[in-house]
Image (tube, grey):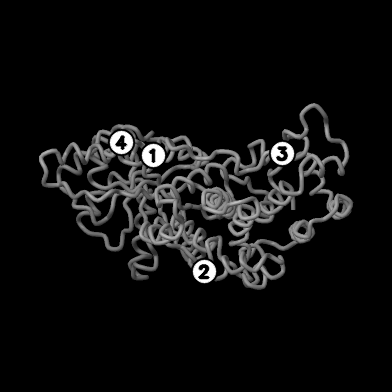
Amino acid sequence: MGTMIDEAQPSARAEGRSDSAHARPVQYPARAPIVDAEGLLRGFELHLREAPTDQCDEPDAKGEADAEAAQLLGALGASDVRTALAGHHGYLNVSRPLLFSDAIARLAPDRFYLEISSQLTVDPELIARLVTLHAKRYRFVIDDVQQPNEAFAKLLPYAQAIKIDPARVAPELLQRLTSALKSAGKLLIALNIETHEAFEEAKALHFDLFQGYFFARGSRHSARRVNAPRQALLNLLRLLSSDPSVAQLEAELKLNPVLVMHLMRLANSGEASIGRKVATLRDAINATGTNRIARWTQLLLYADGRKVRLEEDPLVQLAATRARFMELASARLSHANRKVVDGAFLTGVFSLVDAVFGDTLENTLEALTLASHIRAAILRREGQLGTLLRAMEALEHGDWNALDAASAGLAPLTSGELAQLAITAAAWASTADQSKDNEGLERFDE
């Protein structure tokens, strides 16, 4: 049976390598989730890494700027980037050069919101450009509004949505501002929502969407339900970690009819079932293999108890993307082998497990009996696995400086290659319940 790392390996072309010394490498964006009041995915912010423009005084500066803009925007048309959006809207922060570039036509107006900084200089040229693009059905977001001013008032008529960091606006002003903007029919997006308390406070102010990682934070009061099916998954994972016999695995699965149903579907949809239909649980175990059963179970552990579709569940998407990224990146490093790659996948998938059970991360990892170097990577970001995890976190937050620092210890991988691998991983995660290798990752009935 093929393994997950045998697929979707980035080619030199995909990574933007070129024999030409003058060719720019493709700058793949970082991806951050945007969720609604129910905690379901509704979009992704795409952070583009713009190259420094130090040729502004050269005669061909305009041509250089246009070429740079075309390259940046062209990266958004890559198939992995489109797939990574999982059918949701992309929110793209655009600089003035990007906004004025003809390459903006590469972006489908119905798929992207264009974010304009609230600090941008608003002059007649900018307004004229917004009018032109607005007529072509492009939609705009005013980003990080802290204080309404004349520039904000000029931009407001062209904006469908407003982004506000509630923690950076005085409470009295925040109440008046959100109320006025809601009355004007604007979509409100709360920035930097990192705790469940901040999420509830923003909801009370009638924000519509929320950007941040509150859903991935462990909390005894907000953890996903640890009911019988989820506990059954944990028990199954513990058994799988001990290299069980088929008889032991069969006995454990028989205690959980829902797991049996999913496993039978998994076995009958994969390549192992070609030419014959799997009819017994023992045959299903043999056809699927413990490695695939384990990975399927690990991701199901994060599934929301509300039977949410996996492509709308931000925690499943984050865990799957981290795990796949760790797997793909570790396979590209020196001394990589199956054990190293499997350990990398485990590190990614269990780096968020405290959000499921609400206990401390250390206690939860101890209960899972993970190897000491995997626990060290998750708890303290130690070793090469810890460095990979830091690189993934940098990409989740669009922190390019932190990514550069992490990539220094991940040779031969570069920052650009790590960003591309993260998008490849996100594309895999967004279709994990539809691909041949992961049939059976449907909604988990709790």
Q: Is residue 221 above or below residue 385?
A: below
Going by the image, does 142 lie left or right of 315? left
CA separation, marks 3 and 4?
A: 39 Å
- Badge number at residue 16: 1
The residue shown at (42%, 62%) is: 192
Going by the image, does 121 lie left or right of 378? left
In this view of the protein, which residue sits in the foreground, 124 or 399?
399
**Residue placed furthest toward the front:** 335
SS at circle 2: helix
Crowdedness of circle 2 by 10 Å Cα count: few (<14), some, many (20+)? few
Q: Are marks 2 and 3 in contact (CB under 8 Å)?
A: no
CA separation, marks 2 and 3?
A: 46 Å
CA separation, marks 4 and 1?
A: 11 Å
In this view of the protein, which residue sits in the foreground, 2 or 159?
2
Q: Which residue is mark 3?
A: 1
The residue shown at (85%, 55%) is: 252
Q: Which residue is mark 4?
A: 20
SS at circle 4: loop
CA separation, marks 1 and 2?
A: 42 Å
- Badge number at residue 197: 2
CA separation, marks 3 and 1?
A: 31 Å
Q: Earlier in the sequence, mark 3 or mark 4?
A: 3
Q: Amino acid at mark 1?
A: Gly
Crowdedness of circle 4 by 10 Å Cα count: few (<14), some, many (20+)? few
Which quarter of the picture shows residue 440? top right
